[in-house]
Image: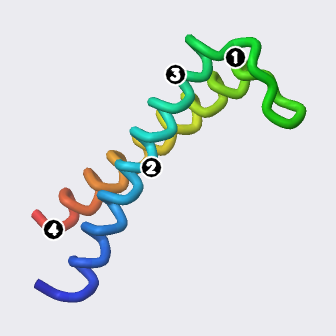
Amino acid sequence: MSFRALSFKSFRSFRTLLGITLVAVGAVLALFFRDLEFLWFRGGPLGLVLVLLGVLDLAESSIVSRRRNGARN
């Protein structure tokens, strides 16, 4: 296994973990802390933005993964 393949796997797992974390934190903010104010943000809208960013991150990670796996075959 080359260094490049190892670094891609660790980066992919980091991106996946980051996406899942963003979705989870955003869902908790949006569902349970709607009226909580964090600096100038409210919990509900901030939570929805975090969920959206997490979903986009997961989708991008899976698309890149599919392209890389398809190129090898």
- Which quarter of the rendering shows the C terminus? bottom left
Distance between the Cα atoms at labels 1 and 2?
20 Å
| Residue under the point 36% across and 49% down | 17
Side of 69 where 20 appears, left or right: right
| Amino acid type indicated by mark 4 | Arg
**Sooner in the amino-acid sequence: mark 4 or mark 2:** 2
Pointer 3 or 4: first along the chain: 3
Mark 3 vs mark 4, CA separation in Å? 36 Å
Question: In percent of the image, x 22 and y 77: which residue is there?
Answer: 5
Q: Which residue is mark 4?
A: 72
- Mark 4 vs mark 2: give the one in front: 2
Which residue is at 33% across, 46% downward? 62
The residue type indicated by label 1 comes to Gly
Residue 18, label in figure: 2
Tell us which disc is closer to us: 3 or 4: 3
Q: CA distance from mark 4 to mark 2?
A: 26 Å
Tell me the amino acid under the disc marked 2. Answer: Leu
- Color encoding of the figure: rainbow
Which sits earlier in the primary sequence, circle 1 or circle 2? 2
Instruction: Report which quarter residue 36 is drawn in.
Output: top right
Of labels 4 and 1, earlier in sequence is 1
Side of 64 relative to 5 (left or right) = right
Choose mark 4 or mark 1, whichever is in front: 1
The answer to which of 21 and 63 lies nearer the viewer is 21
Q: Earlier in the sequence, mark 3 or mark 1?
A: 3
